[in-house]
Every structure is written in structure tokens, then in C-alpha cells.
Image (cartoon, rainbow, N blue to C red):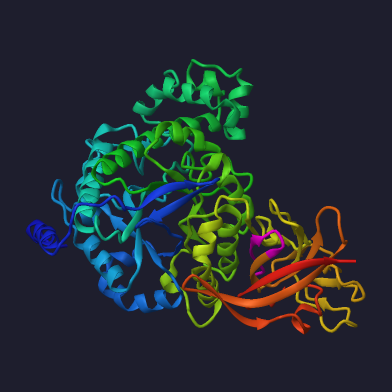
Amino acid sequence: MKSQPIAVALLVAATALGAQQPDAGIPQLRKQGTATQLVVDGKPFLILGGELGNSTASDLERMRPMWAKLRAMNLNTVIAPVYWEFLEPREGQFDFTQVDSLIAQSRANDMRLVLLWFGSWKNSMSSYVPEYVKLDQARFPRTEATRGQGQEILSPFSAANWEADARAFAALMRHLRAFDGSRHTVLMVQVENETGMIPEARDHSPAADSLFARAVPPQLLVYLERHRDALAPELRDRWAARGNRTSGTWEDVFGAGVHTDELFMAWHFAQYHERVAAAGKREYPLPMYANAALIRPGYLPGRYVSAGPLPHLIDVWRAASPSTNFIAPDIYFPNVAEWTEKYTRSANPLFIPEARLTPQVSVDALYVFGKHDAIGYSPFAIEGASTEQGAGAALARSFGLLAQLAPLIAQHQGRGTMTGVMPAAGFEGTVDEAPQTISLAGAEYTLNVSFANPPGPPTAAPATADGPVSFSPGLPGATLQTTQTTRASSAPRGGLVIMLAPNEFLIAGTGMVVTFTPNGAGAPIAGILAADQVHYEKGNWVRGLRMNGDQTHQGRHVALGTGEFTVQRVKLYRYR
């Protein structure tokens, strides 16, 4: 690492080269209808991102040739760590070399950044803290297991711990304000990484035991009272089971057991986050969030990384850390629809900073932007993907489509005129490919979506690897249906739908067949007035193929081929 004088020189040079105080257009969160948008330079911004592997940003020279690949995957943002041990190699001496190099490389490649503060915790452990913290356990205490063994987890109950972290994080944000405040390369900051306790549900140090025996903080109980009707159901039910008490110890209010241990730790972890985040925001108020490792079905607290910003604990985190703008899931399980539904409860904005890099991410990205008005989507270890095949190639096609649609998606966020659709997956990877219906507010038609290959000529009765498909070629409004639940296909299927007018829709994605049913009284059959393959360019629609012939089965459906990522604009009419 460089010495402190070099780091100071870099900061002075940055100022001399024109770094300015941040203007009013710094990245911020803004409501539009029911959605929360990330606004950058005065305009909504959709993060089409990729997160680097944990160690990649520690050697930026090795990273230089990777940028061409990231651009080829149509990313507009890289999610990258900043390491406390590099930023403050010696106590009170800050070195911003890694941060400045990362920003410079991003600018040179026309990319934005979301920074991950690898401070006190990374995947629950304290592996990225500076040596001066690791080597002085008397001053910087750790959590303890039941039998008193120390753990590689800094104690959230120590003022020395959070004060050191907050001081370093504030230095980072102060530097970002000076170095990037007018350029806005950095859009948001994640505070810590997957905070939590494992392999036990709570700390058993003397400091933790003493606080656990005391009364629940009034701040939390007042929050529960004020938000009683909107609490996460898991917390609401646990509190109600003890009579909705407004005073008492943790076990008085929530009962004995590992779930209460988790609530106790969640409160103190979130308070620690608040102290760190608030110190940073006082220097430079970028949006800040906390991320969580998710739970395997049936696991009790302690078997997973417990007490972090999980959906059943969102109210504890909100009460303790108002400076945390939202919580975010790291999704490595197949049941994406289930997790994203949980993370959008109580109007929590959806941002996915990590996702398992498989071909399915190409459809998951379309789904979360359409269904949940997502701020952004970001597969993990993106530098390892191939742009020629597999997940990287599929993501490039999906992100390319989303880049075209971004202005239109932003326009429709929070207005009830857009949704996402894909087969529902279970935790084990089983998929229900039954047809789904889409009803958008104000639409004159219901959309019937099947996740199957398009049928052949009108006389054919096609079959797919997913089972038989029924189709009645004599009925112009016939629906295409799969009839069984299957395991996930190697080819992802799904996409998003935007209502442009009550009788006009934009359908984007892959592996879908869509038919239409008129709503309300009137002629009973939906016909396709026009179906065009389109792309969006510089704010205007550019029409490609007119699809009114064989491609729509002579007006019976709209089909998006499996393995392709296309956009069709379809206008409907009714007849008898």
C-alpha cells in the first residue's frame, strides 16, 4: 500500500484537477407512485450491474483488461468492494489509492459504481478489518460463543469498534464528496456486508448477556406500536403471542428462544450500522443500504447468518437505523419470485446486489424490473462470466434489451401499468410452468401467458420437453397451455409487459406465448390489429418486422422465441 503522503497528494491533485463540492444533482432516491427510483443527474437510473468477486478490486491492475468484457455484457454499473484494511492500514492514516483507481477506471470505461464498504463485517466475519483492530482484542472485542470462545466477529456492543469503523467510513465518504461529488460516478454505498451471527443466534459475551437481561429499548417498542398494522407478519405474530407488551425484557416481550436471541442481535447490529451510516451521510449523503444472506427452508437462527437485514426483521432494522435507506437480498436460491415479494413488503425498494450467475439471471432481471420496479440487478462474480456462451451471453442479451427499455420502464414505474412474469420456482428448483394471467389497471384486455415453445402450423398439435401442449387452431382466441409442473428448463423463460394504452402492450422477453381476452362487455374475441418487432432508440420506437402473418399464427397469439430476447409491440381490437 502507498504511504499517507501519497494518499494526501492524490487528494490534493484531485482537487486541483477540478473536483468540486457536490451539486444538488447527487444520486438520490425519489418516489414515483408506489415506486422508489434512483435519480442520477436529475433522471431515473436503472442499475444494470455486476458485482465483482470479493478479492478482485484488491488488484486493480489485474482488473484493467476486464472492463471490455463488462461493457460487452451491457453493464452500466459495477458493484465493487472498498476494504477497510486498505483504506486505513494504520490507525488514523487513510489511503484512498484503491478507491481513486477504481473510480478512474470506471470513468474511463463509461461505467458507474456502487461501493461496498467491507468494514466491520463481511459475510458475518470481520476478515477485512485493519491489522490494528485484529491484533488488539482487548480494545476491539469480539463476540463469544456459549462456552466463552472468541469468534471472528467484532462485537456490536463495543463503542471502540463502531467508533473506529464510523471514523474510517466517514473519511471514505468525505473523500468521495471531494473526488466524485460533481461527477457522480459512485451512485450508492452498501454499509458492511451480510452482517449477522453464526453459528449461534446471539453473542454470549458478558456485555451481551447484561444487555439481554435489560428492558427492550423504548425506541423499538414505540416503533412497534406506531406501525402495528404494517409490521412484518413474523414479528407481529411473535409480539402478539406475548400480549403486545410495551415494556419488559427481551424474553418478557418476545418470549424465550433463538428467535428472540435473533431479534436482540438484530437491534444491536442495526444500531451499529446506524452509527456508521450516519457518520458517512454527514459527510456525503448518498443512498445507503444493507444487504442480507438469505435463509434455507427450515433453518433456525444460528444455522444461517442471523439477525441481519432479513425481511422478517425489517422493522427492527428500520427502527434502529433510519439512515439505512433500504435492505437488499443476495439471492442465490431459485425461488426468486418468493424472495422478491418478501423484500418489497412495506414499500421497501428492491435492489439485488448479488445473484447467482446462471442463465436464469437473464430473465430474473427482466422480472424484477417489471414486477417490482427494481432499482437495479447485479449478478455476483461478474468478471468470471463468458460473453460468448452461458450466463454471460444470456445476461448480455437481457441487459441490452433493458438498456433500450430503460426510459420507458422508468416512466411506468410505480404506476400500475407494468409487470414481470416468469414461471414460479421453488427452493429446490422445481418450476410451475402453468399459464399465468396478467391484468393491468385500465387495460381493456387480459393477457394469458404460457411458458412454452410457439406452436407449429395451424394443424399441428405441438409437444415440448415440458409435456403436452393443447392448442385449438380453429379458435382465433385460443390459448396455449402446458398441463404439468416441471423441473426448471435449461432455457429461461419470462419477461415483462408494459401497457402503452388500454388496447396496446409492449411485451419483452423470451420463451413466452401470449393470447388475449377482452375485458367487460362487447365483442368477445380479441384480434391482433398489428404486432411489430421493435427496438427503442434515442427516445423513439423503431419498427422492425411486422409480425401479422405466420409469426402470430395468423392473429392468434404473440410468441417470443425461447433463447431469443425480443420486444414486440402489439395493438388489439375486438370482433365477433
Q: Is residue 205 left or right of residue 134?
A: right
Determine the residue positioned at 77% across, 58% down.
446
Residue 298 vertical placement versus 383 (above, below)? above
Residue 63 placed where, x, y %? 31, 73
Name the image quarter holding the C terminus: bottom right
Q: Nearer the viewer, residue 419 or 250?
A: 419
In reply to whether residue 63 is colored magenta, the answer given is no
Residue 79 vertical placement versus 286 (above, below)? below
Q: Is residue 337 left or right of residue 503?
A: left
Determine the residue positioned at 71% across, 80% down.
547
Q: Quadrant of residue 566?
A: bottom right
What is the total number of numbered labels drawn onto the structure image? 0
Can residue 62 be spotted in the picture?
yes
Residue 12 placed where, x, y %? 9, 58
Determine the residue positioned at 37% across, 30% down.
205
Most extreme residue toward the right is 474
Q: Nearer the viewer, residue 466 or 123?
A: 466
Q: Quadrant of residue 57?
A: bottom left
Can residue 134 be spotted in the picture?
no
State the extent of the magenta-drawn residues as a range: 492-504
Q: Nearer the viewer, residue 11 or 558?
A: 558
In reply to whether residue 503 is colored magenta, the answer given is yes
Name the image quarter holding the N terminus: bottom left
Q: Is residue 487 left or right of residue 537?
A: right
Residue 138 placed where, x, y %? 23, 36
Q: Is residue 103 left or right of residue 325?
A: left
Determine the residue positioned at 49% across, 15% down.
247
Most frequent secondary structure within the magenta stretch: strand
Residue 190 placed where, x, y %? 37, 50
